[in-house]
Amino acid sequence: MSKDIGSSRTGWARLGAVGLVGGFFAGIFGVGGGLLMVPLLLWWTSMDQRRASATSLLAITPAAIIGAISYGVGGVFAWLPAIFVAAGSITGAQLGAWILKEIPLEPLRWGFIAFVLLSGAMLFVTVPNRDALFELSATIAALLIGLGLLMGIASGLFGIGGGVIVIPALMLFLGQSDLVAKSVSLLAMAPGSISGSVSHLRYKTASLRDGAWASLGAITTTPLGALVAFGLSAQAAAILFGALTLFVAVSLIYRALKDRKKP
């Protein structure tokens, strides 16, 4: 795998541009930016699905940290529930990174598309309540750890940070505000992303150089995205994110079907 990485170096400008776009949407939607970075890496570079997912995860960690700080500056810093989600995500990211190393590319591609479609559909039926208060109990803590495990697996496998699992789940099933859900997602994302990134570097499914350029772009625009998030209504933010995920999914389906026709 290391030979493939070294023989197809991607220009720093393209990697930085991917990070700029991904970071902006990470700030708005609290999802780490991988939902856009993975498709953009596929479209703008010569990376395959495996390398794009792994590179995206490397770029997500700094963006998640900057995003969490930006939400904190805005008065939303849900650190306590994020600890439980992060506890599950660290283990899950290791498992997801291992699966990424072993799974064939074709089912990985369609698995990612299905994941994006499901996330988009969930957000269209979500009506966030920004007055909701987070009340922790033993049952809620256990649910958050389980949610973090799923978040980590998605993070390591698809390179998307896992926020598309955590945010809809917190809003739909725990009745949380969209801003609180995004804060939890970004705070919990960093430990799991670091865990998965270490695995990707060890398995040589991504290079530190590519991840660094993408992350540099991401941290530049994440605070701007967070500023936009506070200006959007909860329902508008959910609908926009749902529309974005469906657009990305349709674009990826088109590319996958087009590639199948190639000799």
Image: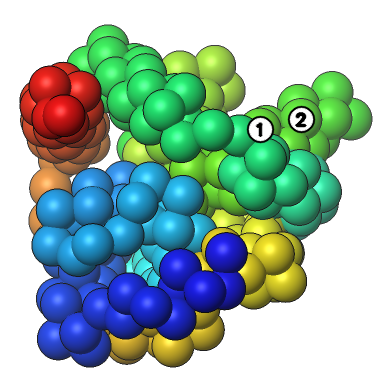
Picture coordinates of residue 214, whole percent (x, y):
32, 78
Residue 223 as seen in the image, left or right of residue 206: left
- Image quarter hosting the N terminus: bottom right
Relative depth, front residue between 98 and 263 = 263
Q: Amino acid at mark 1?
A: Leu
Q: Secondary structure at mark 1?
A: helix
Q: Which residue is pictured at 76% across the width and 52% down the height? A: 94
Tell which residue pokes out farthest to the right in this image.
138
Q: Which residue is mark 2?
A: 146
Q: Which residue is pictured at 67% across the width and 40% down the height? A: 102
Pointer 1 local density, CA inside 10 Å: few below 14, some 14–19, many at least 20: many
Picture coordinates of residue 191, whole percent (x, y):
68, 65
Q: Which residue is pictured at 46% across the width and 36% down the height? A: 105
Q: Which residue is mark 1?
A: 150
Q: Which residue is pictured at 36% across the width and 39% down the height? A: 178
Q: Amino acid at mark 2?
A: Gly
Tell which residue pokes out farthest to the front in this image.
263
